Image (cartoon, rainbow, N blue to C red):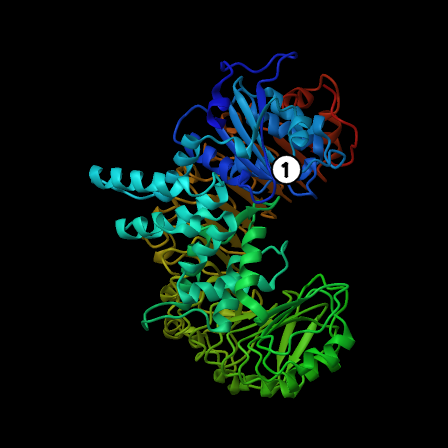
Amino acid sequence: MVRKMLRDAPANDKPSSNNTNCYSVIGIHGVPGSGKTTVAQYVCDKEKDYYYFNLFMWVHVSQNSSVATIFTEMLEILSGRKTNQFSDIDMLQSELEGKLRDKRFLLVLDDFWDDQNAIQLDLLLSPLKVGAMGSRILVTTRTADAAKALGAQNLVAISDLDEEQFFSMFMHYALEGAKVSDQNLLRSYQSIGRKIAEKLGRSPLAARTVAGQLKLRLDIDFWTSTMNNDMLNNGTAATLWWSYQQLEEHLKQCFTYCSIFPRTYKLQRDELVHLWMAEGFVKTTKETEDMEDMGHYYFNLLLSTSFLQLKVNEFSKEYFTMHDLFHDLAASAAGSDFFRIEEGMVGNIPKDVRHLFILSYDERVFQEEILNLKSLRTLIMSSSSNKSMNIEDFRSMLKILKKLRVALVEVENFPTISPCVGQQKHLRYLGLFGKIPMMTLPRQFTELYHLQKFAVRCTTSVDFHFKNEIANLVNLRYMICRVFNSPDIRRLTLLRTLPVFRVKKTRGYEIQQLEHLDNLRGNLSILGLENVESKEEACQAKLANKVHLSYLVLQWNSDQKSDSEEVIEALRPPFLISSLKIVNYNGSTYPCWFSREKDALKNLQHLELSDCNAPPVIGESFLNLHTLVISNCTWSSLPENLERLTFLEKLVIRSCSNIMHLLLLPQSLKVLTLESWEGSLLPENMEGLECLEELSLRKCNNILSLPTLPMSLKKLEIHECSNSLAETCYTDGHPNWHKIAHIKLTRISGFNLPLPR
């Protein structure tokens, strides 16, 4: 029914006239838990198999959403990257129009609330009018009136799904991604699936949940036993309980653990996996199995069977929630093991509770009740709690609650952790949040032999009152802080995070300390490379073995000389590194792995060179480069053959006083930024850069005249350049004025009025 509505109106490829919208609105409405989002997801999945719509956009509309956040999310979906907000609502609207013009789109507004005072509906719909005829808006909402406010004339109550539509959706999720080549077997699945679907009362949520279990077990016997199970006849809640019973025991533990969080809590994938690991829920059966990988496998199983739901915020960042019915199920299964203290709560905390979440902190409750919970294994305070834990209560927690495995608390500003922290023999995850500029850890901290993760705010520096003892923390996987600068880290072989390692000419800080830290992930900055005394020392760091790293910084101190050419040759990065930054390299040539070996940096997409003596040779290693940043370098020209970089999309040149001419730039370029540049002429092939969308000129005082700019240019920023350039851009009839007339988003510092058109 819904898919038929998507195509009912005649469509052509022309934009709408002033009197006719290019789109129509379809509303799916129903009570919470009825499966509105499931239906919309199914419709989108099926439509993507065809080529009727050119563009798809899915935006979750929360109660706090504004037109600006919705526009921003739509732009990020359409562009595939973060929106660089110049960025008022008019600019967002203009850029959206550019993306949507003459395109037939399908926009899903999921969970649209009927508080129409919160969103200006006319403004929200305005940029959509430039699309091609046949475009559609699909809105899911709790009431028909909310859909009507958006202009919906086609309304679907969730109870209106007919039997065939429901069956089709059910089988889509039950066989999603499965390859069943035996047609007789496929017919058997279809036949049994139809009988299972008939039991589910046309509830989309029940359909997706049961289908998720069937997809995990493409086994006729399991499908048949499911078909014969009478529990599926007893409504959605009973069906969800049946689905829970199909989980293995470790998955049940992980799922019920989620009941500790409030209903509206935004779960983060990595954080939840780390909590499961700390609680001992994640099991590996082989030495070669990685605990994080297993935890993520558990997470994906719960996600694929709808126990967890994927959401995306206004910055296109993933988070996860639990449907209210699943939250009720988790709470029922958890029993008295889990408890939450919420604002205005009355009644006592169960004495046998093992996992406690504090939404509203109260000193009296903590001192009189929580400190008496002798079985407590988890204590988590909400970061939005209106009160922090004081130093006395924190010390009492460490001394009294001896069975804690997880402690995540909001604390007042205190500079040191009490030595009694060493008494927490079972502690695996300690997180301290609050305004803590610096924290000192006592020597007893190294007695937390089971500790897997220690986290403070990223603005907090951690000082250690111990030296060799750091090696006692053999289970440490994550040390999250601004600076982790401890000697003798070589035995922390499970460590995943080491944002900065500073090489010193002091025992315990040698670059060889990195040799066995092959589990490092994400970002690693190695500073103080002038203190590496030989190529042999650099080789012992074995950087090439750190295959999970994605971003590497190699930095020398500009005030000290060293044999940097031999050292950098030995610091070969892992071959799948995607981002590389080199700072203060004083060598006259670059290593073989940098530019002369074809596959040495085959995945490199971002390269930044800062304060380096020599320009690199554009070799085979750079052919997949997307971003190139050159800053404070002394070269007299850009690297030769820059136009060979056929995938380069962004070029930034900053404070390079000797580079006076840009010559030819790659045709693929989309963003060009020049800052503190002393040249006067832009690239020779500027007009031919037909992919260029953004041009930013900052502190470029010698540019007085603009070349002919490509028609593809959508954003122009001129900031702190010559007054003459700014004034002529505003002078009606001046050549500079004509050259920017086609650019919709223009910002020139010192002028607040819009450009004349």
Number of numbered discs visible in the structure rendering: 1
Q: Is residue 307 left or right of residue 744?
A: left
For residue 671, what is the image quadrant?
A: top right
The secondary element bearing badge 1 is classed as: loop
User: Do we see residue 260 in this rendering?
Assistant: yes
**Callout 1: 10 Å neighbours few (<14), some, many (20+)?**
many
User: Do we see residue 598 in this rendering?
Assistant: no
Residue 216, position as x, y percentages in the image: 35, 52
Residue 506 vertical position relative to residue 226 in the rendered view, above or below: below
Q: Foreground: 688 or 464?
A: 464
Instruction: Please report the residue visible at 48 percent of the width from the left and 41 percent of the height from the top.
Output: 204
Q: Foreground: 653 or 603?
A: 603
Residue 681, position as x, y percentages in the image: 59, 32
Residue 286, position as x, y percentages in the image: 31, 71
Q: Identify the amino acid type marked 1.
A: Arg
For residue 557, what is the image quadrant?
A: bottom right
Residue 18, position as x, y percentages in the image: 65, 12
Quadrant of the rendering where the C terminus is positioned = top right
Residue with the mark numbered 1: 142
Residue 210 vertical position relative to residue 575 in the rendered view, above or below: above
Q: Foreground: 334 or 642?
A: 334
Instruction: Please report the residue visible at 67 percent of the width from the left and 38 percent of the height from the top.
Output: 113
Q: Is residue 347 left or right of residue 572?
A: right
Residue 700 vertical position relative to residue 392 in the rendered view, above or below: above
Instruction: Please report the residue visible at 51 percent of the width from the left and 39 percent of the height from the top.
Output: 80
Q: Foreground: 85 or 720?
A: 85
Residue 232 vertical position relative to residue 390 in the rendered view, above or below: above
Q: Is residue 155 left or right of residue 476?
A: right
